[in-house]
Image (spheres, helix red, strand yellow):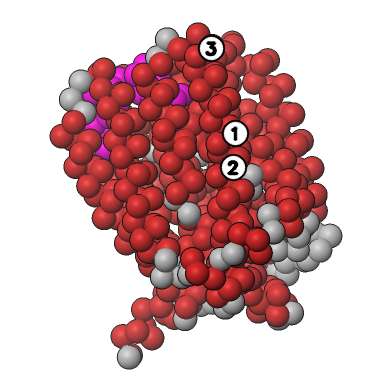
Amino acid sequence: MQTQKNIFYNVLLALSQVLFPLITFPYLARVLGPENIGLYNFSESYARYFALVAALGISVYGVREIAKKQDQPKALSNTFAELFLINLIATSILSILYLFTIGYTNKLSSHANLFYWSFVFFFFQIFLLEWFFTGINQFKYIAVRFFIIRLIFVAAIFIFIKEANDYVKYMQLQVGLTFFLGVINFIFLFKFIDLKNIRIKELNLIQHLKPLFLLFLTIFSISVYLHFDTVLLGILADNESVGYYSAPLKLVKIIIAVLAAITAAMFPKMVQYFEQGDLVQFEKMLKQSFELVLSIGIPTALLVYTLAPEIIFILFGSSFESAVTPLQITAPLILIVSLSTIFGFQILSVYSKDSAILKSAIVGMLFSLIASFLLIPKFKQDGAAYIILCTELLVLSFFIFYSSKVIQLKNTKALIAREIVFAIPYLILPYLAALIVTAAVPKLILVLFCAFIWFFLVHFYFVKTSALKMLFTDLFISRIKK
């Protein structure tokens, strides 16, 4: 039951991460315009890239290590202190490089005010501590905290962002949001961490360096094609191209986050089963995760692809027409990246096959870099979209190959065939709806309504053993009986 609750709160969190941008995206796109929103996204991506490197893989490694120690108060406190100090040291070192690039790079120094604020945003990332709260199964806290703070943030956007030049104010709001999240985190943190239990002399930072080094190389390689792509596009093309590319990609990543919420919520329990040697329960949860990703990822990717013109028009306006093609190109990432999470995060990471993850990531990084310099100058945002699609597909192929050496998922072919057959109506619905209504908003509403009805029938009526149906039953029906 605890796992189902975790999934519920994590999905609730991910849905709120979808809902709030859907409220703010249309407003920001129209107020800031393609060029300024592209400039902001460039600065945010730059900051997040540095933060990702400074984390040294703690976002993954930390969850795993904290999950192992969650029932050992002393060990939990020490592990947290060790990982936090490592993150703080790495962030401090990279801060020097960050400030240097702002002062001595024309692309950044010409918008120094914006990038200095993005530097503060980067530094404050160490206080978010998502890895710790995920590791101790505090998904309710993460969801409720995010929802309340984000609600205030959305209100602030409509109050303070009024004209095209307010992109610096937007970054300042992001800094404020991150700061308050950090303050709240540390207040809540002390319910689980006892500072009296921590002795500096007892801390062993060195023990984490080898596994973190492998993960760092992996995260760095992944970050090149997952986050640095926007930075490269800004350097090799222009800010407007960044706007046309980053806007739809951010939407796709938000949808991916919803699916990732399911696998992330299941991960601590899966680690626990694996550490206890209960491979039957581990494989059962793994198969459930695989089915959930397929059953949600396939129809969602198809709907985003077919409804791309309507989605872009409604969310960003007619000035973002050039973003339609990048959205269609990147729509399959919803399924591809979600599957990579299963094979890379839930299988290879649990089996400590960090070298396999690293090799896969390096292949993706090299392909992405070479393709970026060849395609982006000519094809701009469309070229960047094709590059990230092919890169993620290549990495997933390697993840599947290495995963097959440690575990075999049973009955996957039948499951995949079933989901593909049931997904056909999602591909047809938009074209049928176009015969009835042509306006963007009514068409989108009609298609989504029909798609929801079909989705409900498939997983709660036609498929008797649907993982979604069982999840819903365990979570809601059992609570009603209580």
Residue extending farthest to the bottom is 482
Q: Amino acid at mark 2?
A: Ile
State yes or no: residue 37 in magenta: yes
Q: In the rendered view, does 395 fall on the left or right side of 471?
A: right
Place residue 323 in its image quadrant.
top left
* Precedes in sequence: disc 3 or disc 2: 2
Q: Which mark is residue 105?
A: 3
- Point out residue 109 in the picture as x, y percentages from the top left corner: 45, 12
Vertical arrangement, residue 29 with respect to residue 186, above or below? above
* Local secondary structure at mark 2: helix
Q: Is residue 442 visible?
A: no
Determine contact: label 2, label 1, CB under 8 Å: yes
Q: Which residue is mark 2?
A: 89
In front of the other: 46 or 94: 94
Rendered residue at 34%/30% (across/down) = 171
Rendered residue at 41%/78% (across/down) = 475
- Point out residue 122 in the picture as x, y percentages from the top left corner: 47, 35
Magenta part of the chain:
22-45
